[in-house]
Image (tube, helix red, strand yellow):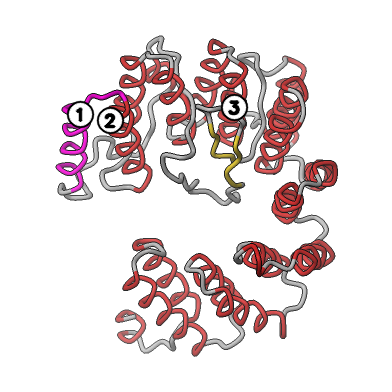
Amino acid sequence: ERELRRIGAKPNAFIYTAWASMEYKKGGDSDSKAVRRARELYQLALEADPRCSVAYLQLGVMESDCGNYDRAKECFEKVLKFDQRNSRVLQAYAIMESRRPREDVDSRRVLDLFERALKANPRDAGVYQAYALYVAELGDIDSARNLLKRGTEVDKRHAPVWQAWGVLETRYSTAKNARDVFQQGIWACASSCGGQSGGRRCARLWQAWGVLEAQEGDHAAARRCFSRALDADPRNVAAVTAWTLMEADLGNYADARSIFERTLKLFPPRSDDKLSLWRAYEVMEERAGNTSAAQQIFQRSMREAMTPRDDEVNPNNIPPTMNELLISDPQSPVNGDLFSIKEKSNEVEVSRWNTGSNNLDAEVWINNGSIEGKLPQKMMKKLRNGANRR
C-alpha cells in the first residue's frame, strides 16, 4: 500500500485481495482480529473494483469458513449478477450451502448449483469432484462414482479426482477396485521426468493407496506405497502422518520417530506444515505414554518457532532425494483425526473420509496409484516419446 502511494498508483483490487488472503491465512478463522483485518482489505479491493469477482469469491469463502453463511451467500450472489457463468463461484456457493446446519441445508438447492457450475464449464474436473463428494454424502454412491469417472474423462491429469474415486472405492467397494483406480490415476498423472514414482502429482495417490493397504493389513505393501509417496514428494505431510501413525499402531515407535526426524529437516521453521508435523509427533508420544518425550518435542518446536525465519537448514530449498532420505526405512499410516492437513498447491483438497477402520482415518487428496514400485515400461516409453515431441 505504501508503495502504491509512493509511485502515485491507484488502489489495486488484486493487491488488496492478495493482502487480505495473506492476513486471513496467517490467522485462520479462529483469529477474530485476522478475520476482521482481512474483511477490511477485501472491502478496499471491492471499492477499487466493484466487479472484482476474485475478491467476492475469497471473501465469500472466508465468511463460509467462519460460519457466516448468509454473508457468504451475499458475496456469491453479487458475483453472479455480472458473471453468471463463473463455475468456481457456483462451486463455492454449492459447497457453502452444503455446510449449513443439517436442518437448514436445501439439498435441491445444492444440487442445482453444482449443475449450474457444470453447465457453465463442463470441463472443470474440480466441480465434478466436489459434486461427487456431496452426492456420496447423500448416499448415492453410483451417481458419485459416475461423476468422478466423468471428471477423469474431462481432465485425465486432475489428481484429486482420481484420488477421490479411489477412496470412494476403498470405502464402498472392494480393495481390488480401489487399487485399479489408483493405478490408472498414477499412469494418467505421471510426469515423464517423475522417475519410478511418477512425480509430485502422484504423491497423494500413493498416500491414499498406502492407507488402503494398511487398512487391509498388508503393512509391507503400505510401506512401499508411503515410500513411493515420499519419493514423489518428500514434503508430503499426509504421507508422513499416515506412515508414522501406522508404525505407531504396530508398536514400531523407533521407525516412526526416524520418519518424523528425517522429514522435519526438510521444512523451514514456523511453516504450517512443520508445525503440524511437530504436533503429530508430540501426540504420538503422548498416546504412547511417553510424557517426557512429548514435552521435549514441544519444547523443541517452541525453540525453533522463536528463531528467525531466515535460519533454514536448507537455504537453497532443495529437498534431498529419497535415497538420501530413506536409508532403508519403510514404515507409517494416517489419522485424519489428529489435525487437519492443508495441501499447498493449486489442486483442491478433497475432504475427510472415514475408512471404517478403528485406527486409520484418511485425509483424502487426489492423484494416482500403483502397488508396484515402478511404472510399466510401455507407459514410461510413451511418456518419454510425448516429451520428445513437445
Query: Badge 3: how crowded within 10 Å, few (<14), some, or many (20+)?
Result: many
Write the start and end of the magenta stretch as one range.
288-305
Residue 90, percent across and down? Answer: 71, 69
Name which residue type carries label 2: Glu
Residue 103, percent across and down? Answer: 66, 66
Can residue 387 be seen at all in this image of the molecule? no
Can residue 268 be seen at all in this image of the molecule? yes
| Residue, disc 1 | 291
Marks 1,2: beta carbons within 8 A: yes
* Majority SS type along the magenta span: helix
In front: 39, or 12?
39
* Vertical relation: 15 (above or below) 152: below
Q: Residue at x 18, y 42 (%)?
A: 304
Q: Nearer the viewer, mark 1 or mark 3?
A: 1
Marks 1,3: beta carbons within 8 A: no
* Vertical relation: 126 (above or below) 278: below
Indicate which disc, 2 or 3, sits on the residue closer to the N terminus.
3
Residue lying at the far front of the rendered structure: 103
